Image: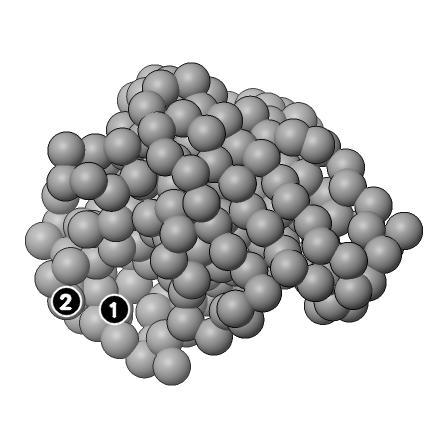
Amino acid sequence: QLQLQESGSGLIKPSQTLSLTCAVSGGSISISGYSWSWIRQSPGKGLEWIGHISHSGSTLYNPSLKGRVLISEDRSKNQFSLHLISVTAADTAVYYCARDFDSSGHFDHWGQGSLVTVSS
Amino acid sequence: DIVMTQSPLSLPVTPGEPASISCRSSQSLLYSNGYNYLDWYLQKPGQPPQLLIYLGSNRASGVPDRFSGSGSGTDFTLKISRVEAEDFGVYYCMQSVQVPVTFGQGTRLDIE
């Protein structure tokens, strides 16, 4: 049974860097055919796809984040991470990690979500 | 970005009755391989969205057959033949034919 679990900073100040990690169990992030995404949900903007990292390590990001985002992986720990720099209150959201199928784009497994609040 | 528009935004339904949600996209979701890159998700309070339908009409594993997805191009529909108590929550459509992936604003299915 594939499981994903987010962890990381829950409260950060404006201009700081948001850092979250998604630990994957029950399956390898290196298996071809899948990518590993970050998605966030805020009351004001609904569900927003942030980006993903493929099984081979290539990344794709939402242009709306204007170069502030970095997704990386640690295959030895079977986990992937999100870093979002120069955060503002608008980045306050529940952040989810999820697995997506390369061939069809759907997200079949999600983490439970991690609330990140940006406040001074 | 492709804009996804759902209607209605709120749908009160009596258990046992059918329900239908519409999703329209600002561009066609039909890819050259013949598949529509449109998915449906249900989110219950305090939980992440869960996949119901992928590629327009394919039920995900474990999803009851009272759920069905249809449509092509820019117009899609999710139908529930007989709503059960466990079906209440917020439904989202999502497109993945073009980056960035985008979601509809959600339709809240409430008990009437």
Q: Residues within 10 Å of mark 1 (few under 14, many from 20)?
A: some
The amino acid type, in three-letter code, at marker 2 is: Ile
Q: Secondary structure at mark 1?
A: loop
Nearest the eye: B104 or B16:
B16
Same chain letter for marks 1 and 2: yes
Chain ID of residue with mark 2: A
Q: Percent x, y for residue A11?
A: 62, 44
Report if residue B90 is visible in the image. Answer: yes
Nearest the eye: A66 or B86:
B86
Q: On the picture, is A23 further left or further right than B65?
A: left
Name which residue lies at 82% across and 63% down: B15
Name which residue lies at 34% across and 69% down: A24
* Quarter containing the N terminus of chain B: top left
Report if residue A113 is visible in the image. Answer: no
Q: CA distance from mark 1 to mark 2?
A: 11 Å
**Residue A67 quadrant:** top left
Per the image, the residue denoted by label 2 is A31
Q: Percent x, y for residue B98?
A: 27, 29
- Looking at the image, residue B30 lies above or below residue B58: above
Which disc, if any, is residue A78?
A: 1
Q: On the picture, is A16 further left or further right than B112?
A: left
Which disc, if any, is residue B95?
A: none
**Tag 1 and tag 2, C-beta contact below 8 Å:** no
Nearest the eye: A5 or B15:
B15
Q: On the picture, is A68 further left or further right than A60?
A: right
Q: Secondary structure at mark 2?
A: loop
Q: Earlier in the sequence, mark 1 or mark 2?
A: 2
The amino acid type, in three-letter code, at marker 1 is: Asn
